[in-house]
Image (spheres, rainbow, N blue to C red):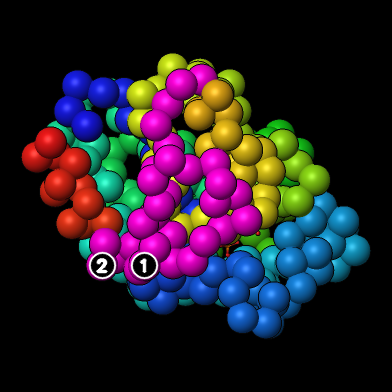
Amino acid sequence: MRGKKVVVLTGAGISAESGIKTFRDNDGLWENYRIEDVATPQAWQADPELVWKFYQARRRQMKEVGPNPAHEALARLESELDDFTLITQNVDDLHERGGSLSIIHMHGRLETLRCEKSGQIEVRMSDEDLEDDFLFCNCCAESSRVRPDIVWFGEMPMQMDEIYDAIGSCDVFIVVGSSGHVYPAAGLASAARLAGAQTILVNFEMPINGYDFDEVHLGKAGEILPKLVEKWLAE
Ligand code: APR
């Protein structure tokens, strides 16, 4: 792995052992809600209060959990490699708290909020920012309501140019904890492979795009990723 250009994509599975629920396990619901009722622009328009309270609960929950050994293993990999890009679909800050320095949050972040008028984002994580009432921006002359800084279904993921640049030129592409259901993220493994990269998967179970990987490691990321990282760095 040393001397190679490495790109990693993470999904909800990497945060599962920290106590954050994944999206598509078990009952098909996300924290008791249907995804379309809380994670679409239509839901925000139809019932902003429900959507706001849902995300405020996610923001509060994030403060109560911590990174696990899988997050820390990726931070170690970053610190040892010269050319490393971490892309996450996760909106939590566990990669940051696990020690990763540079992270592309393609589906947005929970810790920032976005002005509905100007689109500017602000980090808003103080105690008074975590209650159920709507919050208003600090950027407009007449303060506007803010929305979660999240990429909802039907919206464009963030930093896609950077992501495709990294994918198109990498030697190794590693996916950790993602079910392969949501595009464009789910298509990155096949894009990397087409561009000539070796593709590696670390996931609890075989995802629907499992055939896109040259190497598959099934199990809990917190248990198997730290060992894999040590092995990769020793090679
Ligand atoms: N270690 C490794 N993998 C795990 C673990 C674990 N401890 N626990 C669960 N997994 C796996 C599951 O088997 C599943 O394949 O992680 C995957 C999680 O899949 P999803 O819940 O579908 O999460 P993800 O792929 O990140 O979802 C993509 O969908 O709802 C949207 O925007 C949201 O970013 C999210 C996107």
- Up/down of 36 relative to 65, above or below: above
Q: Secondary structure at mark 1?
A: loop
> Where residue 195 sits in the image (x, y, percent)?
51, 20
Asked whether the viewer can see residue 176, the reply is: yes
- Up/down of 221 relative to 211, above or below: below
What is the three-letter code of the residue carrying label 2? Glu
Q: Are marks 2 and 1 in contact (CB under 8 Å)?
A: yes
Residue where numbered disc 2 is placed: 223
Q: Residue at x 40, y 52 (%)?
A: 216
Q: Residues within 10 Å of mark 1 (few under 14, many from 20)?
A: some
Q: Quadrant of residue 80?
A: top left
Given residues 77 and 207, the one toward you in this image is: 207
Let me know if residue 203 is in the magenta part: yes
- Up/down of 106 relative to 145, above or below: above
Q: Residue at x 46, y 21 (%)?
A: 196
Let me know if residue 182 is in the magenta part: no
What is the three-letter code of the residue carrying label 1? Gly
Q: Is residue 153 left or right of residue 70?
A: right
Given residues 7 and 121, the one toward you in this image is: 7
Q: Secondary structure at mark 2?
A: helix
Q: Is mark 1 within 8 Å of ligand 1?
A: yes
> Where residue 117 sits in the image (x, y, percent)?
76, 39
Asked whether the viewer can see residue 72, the reply is: no
Q: Is mark 2 within 8 Å of ligand 1?
A: yes
Q: Is residue 156 left or right of residue 166?
A: right
How many numbered marks appear?
Answer: 2
Q: Nearer the viewer, mark 2 or mark 1?
A: 1
Residue where numbered disc 1 is placed: 219
Look at the image and tell me in which quarter the C terminus lies: top left
- Up/down of 37 relative to 76, above or below: below
The segment highlighted magenta reads: 195-224
